Image: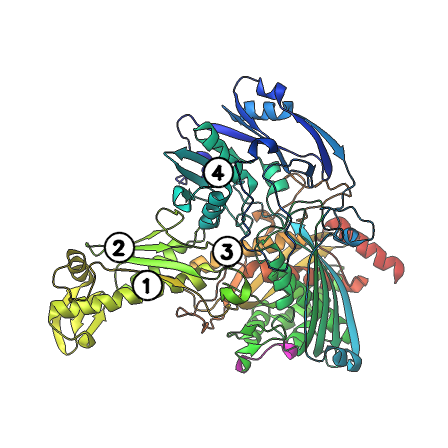
């Protein structure tokens, strides 16, 4: 209906506009910055450089970083060196965007270019350019674990399967680029921002700008996509707030699409060297994996955890008793990576599922049979993995069997053989996966795992729910209202869900990691239980009965064994707020707030299958079918779950077939536009075929596991496996993503020449 209100729709009186001059070099020394000519342009209100910020701002807060990681300081504006293309160098405040763009162009910066490194393997080479002088090896962190008799398994294996897998960098490409509006009035700062974590942004602004948190308010209006790329804290937001404070007028910043490509955190970016010890029958005895991940020029919020999660999920949904994992993360002269939809779990699934297909190929076995032979059985839960994760529940074999039925696997193989006679090349690929959702507990993960949920029954009987999550299109308001209406016995229309405003929501963590329903939902449910407990005591006083005799049915409180004698929730709420007839030890009001922390992750799972047709002479791929069977735990709203999986599937398909943030040797991103960076279009996608397995999680009272990232995790390896299956007659055994036509054609030609 066009009723959405996004950051760029906000217009405040006397609002100015912020434009950021960004480095055109991936690595250079700044010899000088001259703003004289730019400052004289009509309409320019102020220009700030790094020297103007000195003494007025503090360092970025260290939130969400592993304690063992090297973390160099990241300035709001570069002073002596720039380390990636797009790094902020100067900030222009002007009366409109066009004046700001002209003024930024007029700023004279003297750069002395230096050698850059954009490839992670090159960053580790002896004599490689240093991204940060204090870290001569360019290493952010090294992390490893080992469990079981790995060496013994490889010694007795019938064969060792080896793969090198590249998980290319990708962009979130949210429909709405990053942006914010800041206003400073009466000693208080208000920021409207497109963020997934408003409370973290509030804390960051308060620390950098030397304000008490009570003086900072963050409001998230409608948000046009996040996907993890809007979790972190950006210098842009602090610069916008600083400008508003210095000029005493509102300031708006909205990035261009190219700026968004260059300076919004990116995803994936791993190289995995994998070895599997395999028995004659296709049983995987052990896995070894060395992962190299480049995190960009600066350490971004939660970034190292993606590679660590890849390692923790290395064995996937399989009964693999021994494993060894080594992670090396490095600095490069590129934009930082950070969590992107799935954050380490898609990479782990890609490792597992490409390995399973290669095991099947080398052993001469069916890929579905190899998976079934290795999958964890339903009677083995809770299941402890070699990495130490304890999977809560699941039906992995049932999901695989459901997919095989839906694709009519036996008939497909017959059709495939018939089509090959006609020189038409069909392929099918599978991906069985398990992932993590939510985070918990905080003390074991070094990531904030709790979430807040509040419930208030108003005197009228209407209900207000306050959640610390920050919904932005998932439909969580509907799901939370459903939970509340069901547990309290009130109509959904009587429930209002409030969120994404730090003046209303006192504390919260945010929306990411498929945590809203699995962590935010139980927080709300716990508060509802507290409200009901108090309501029972009030109803007992009103009905002159013992609290133990009070029963609740569809929003009415009655006395057990005394039919017809009831009071409504509205009656109870009115008495609670009027403070009349309350038990003597009870405070007025009918509300509760819970900060709930999970005792463990939840573990959504599933199996996806892709059917493709490949034209080897042109390299084109046509996706014919995508079948997804997901176990998200107990489903609160099937339509919302379906929408989440649809979106995830589209992004997973995009990575498999089209998406790639490519950097040249000088550190220039050569695909930083929608002309060069291809994303999935609806016309290129089939109608998705979805089904579900429902295995409630014992981790929370709702039994929910989470669903926001499953589609992205399962779809990508299924498509790659399908394309390689289609090209099997040509001898093609491996392709790196994206599966561009030129890459497929080249692989086919190479296979033809070398067979």
Picture quadrant of residue 436:
bottom right
Q: Nearer the viewer, mark 2 or mark 4?
A: 4
Judged left or right of residue 112, residue 490 is left
Q: What residue is at 78 percent from the left and 82 percent from the top? A: 156
Q: Is residue 212 left or right of residue 531?
A: right
Q: Secondary structure at mark 3?
A: loop
Dot 2: within a 10 Å radius of its alpha carbon, few (fewer than 14), some, or many (20 or more) residues? some
- Label tally: 4
Q: CA distance from mark 2 to mark 3?
A: 28 Å
Secondary structure mainly formed by the magenta segment: helix
Q: Does 321 appear above or below 112?
A: below
Q: Quadrant of the C terminus?
A: bottom right
Residue 77, placed above or below residue 282: above
Is label 2 or label 3 in front? 3
Classify 29 as above or below 733: above
Instruction: State which tag comes first along the sequence, 3 or 4.
Output: 4
Dots 4, 1 in contact, CB < 8 A: no
As drawn, the label of residue 494 is 2
Q: Earlier in the sequence, mark 2 or mark 4?
A: 4
Query: Is residue 441 at least partly visible in the picture?
Result: yes
Q: Which residue is mark 4?
A: 180
Q: Mark 1: few, some, or many residues within 10 Å (few <14, many ≥20)?
A: many
Q: CA distance from mark 2 to mark 4?
A: 33 Å
Which of pointers 4 and 1 lies earlier in the amino acid sequence? 4
Q: Are marks 1 and 3 in contact (CB under 8 Å)?
A: no
Residue to which mark 3 is pinned: 512
In the orientation shown, which residue stands out farthest toward the front?
55
How far is disc 4 from disc 1 in space, using C-alphas? 33 Å
Q: Secondary structure at mark 1?
A: helix
| Residue 527 circle label | 1
């Amino acid at each position: 209906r066009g009723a959405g209100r996004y950051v760029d729709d906000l217009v405040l009186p006397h609002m100015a506009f912020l434009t950021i001059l960004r480095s055109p070099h991936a690595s250079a020394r700044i010899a000088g910055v001259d703003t004289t000519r730019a400052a004289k342009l009509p309409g320019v209100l102020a220009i700030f450089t790094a020297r103007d910020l000195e003494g007025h701002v503090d360092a970025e807060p260290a939130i969400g970083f592993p304690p063992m990681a090297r973390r160099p300081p990241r300035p709001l504006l570069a002073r002596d060196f720039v380390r990636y293309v797009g790094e902020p160098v100067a900030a222009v405040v002007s009366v409109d965007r066009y004046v700001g763009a002209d003024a930024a162009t007029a700023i004279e910066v003297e750069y002395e270019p230096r050698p850059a490194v954009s490839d992670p393997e090159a960053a580790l080479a002896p004599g490689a350019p240093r991204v940060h002088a204090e870290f001569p090896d360019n290493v952010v962190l090294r992390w490893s674990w080992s469990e079981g008799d790995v060496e013994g398994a490889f010694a007795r294996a019938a064969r060792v399967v080896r793969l090198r897998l590249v998980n290319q960098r990708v962009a979130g490409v949210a429909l709405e680029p990053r942006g914010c509006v800041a206003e400073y009035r009466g000693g208080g700062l208000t920021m409207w921002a497109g963020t997934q974590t408003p409370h973290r942004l509030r804390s960051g602004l308060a620390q950098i700008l030397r304000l008490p948190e009570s003086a900072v308010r963050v409001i998230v209006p409608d948000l046009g996509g996040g996907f993890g790329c809007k979790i972190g804290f950006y210098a842009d937001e602090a610069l916008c707030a600083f400008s508003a404070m210095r000029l005493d007028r509102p300031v708006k910043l909205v990035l261009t699409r190219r700026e968004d490509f260059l300076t919004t955190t990116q995803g994936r970016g791993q190289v995995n060297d994998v070895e599997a010890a395999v028995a004659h029958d296709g049983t995987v005895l052990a896995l070894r994996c060395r992962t190299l991940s480049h995190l960009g020029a600066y350490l971004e919020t939660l970034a190292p955890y993606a590679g660590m999660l890849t390692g923790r999920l290395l064995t996937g949904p399989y009964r693999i008793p021994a494993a060894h994992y080594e992670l090396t993360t490095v600095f490069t002269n590129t934009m930082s990576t950070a969590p992107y939809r799935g954050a380490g779990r898609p990479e782990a699934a890609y490792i597992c599922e490409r390995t399973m297909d290669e095991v099947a190929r080398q052993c001469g076995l069916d890929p579905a049979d190899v998976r079934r032979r290795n999958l964890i059985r339903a009677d083995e839960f809770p299941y402890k993995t070699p990495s130490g994760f304890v999977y809560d529940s699941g039906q992995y074999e049932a999901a695989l069997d459901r997919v095989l039925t839906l694709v009519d696997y036996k008939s497909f193989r017959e059709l495939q053989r018939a089509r090959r006679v006609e020189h038409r090349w069909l392929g099918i690929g599978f991906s069985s996966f398990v992932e993590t959702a939510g985070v918990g507990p905080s003390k074991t993960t070094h990531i904030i795992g709790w979430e807040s949920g509040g419930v208030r029954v108003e005197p009228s009987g209407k209900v207000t729910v306050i959640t610390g999550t920050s919904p932005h299109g998932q439909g969580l308001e509907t799901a939370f209202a459903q939970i509340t209406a069901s547990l309290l016995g009130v109509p959904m229309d009587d429930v209002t869900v409030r969120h994404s405003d730090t003046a209303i929501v006192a504390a919260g963590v945010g929306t990411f990691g498929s945590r809203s329903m699995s962590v935010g939902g139980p927080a709300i449910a716990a508060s509802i239980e507290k409200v009901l407990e108090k309501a029972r005591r009030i109803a007992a006083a009103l009905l002159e009965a013992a609290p133990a005799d009070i029963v609740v049915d569809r929003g009415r409180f009655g006395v057990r064994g005394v039919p017809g004698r009831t009071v409504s929730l509205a009656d109870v709420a009115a008495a609670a707020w009027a403070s009349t007839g309350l038990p003597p030890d009870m405070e007025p009001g009918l509300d509760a707030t819970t900060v709930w922390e999970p005792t463990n992750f939840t573990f959504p799972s599933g199996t996806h299958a892709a059917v493709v047709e490949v034209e080897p002479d042109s390299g084109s791929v046509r996706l014919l079918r995508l079948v997804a069977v997901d176990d998200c735990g107990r489903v609160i709203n099937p339509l919302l779950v379906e929408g989440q999986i649809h979106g995830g599937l589209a992004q997973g398909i995009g990575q498999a077939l089209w998406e790639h943030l490519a950097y040249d040797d000088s550190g220039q991103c050569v695909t930083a536009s929608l002309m060069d960076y291809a994303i999935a279009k609806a016309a290129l996608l089939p109608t998705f075929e979805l089904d579900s397995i429902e295995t409630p999680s014992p981790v929370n009272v709702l039994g929910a596991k989470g669903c926001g990232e499953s589609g992205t995790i399962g779809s990508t390896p299924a498509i790659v496996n399908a394309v390689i299956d289609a090209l099997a007659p040509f001898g093609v055994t491996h392709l790196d993503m994206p599966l561009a036509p030129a890459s497929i054609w080249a692989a086919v030609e190479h296979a033809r020449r070398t067979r």
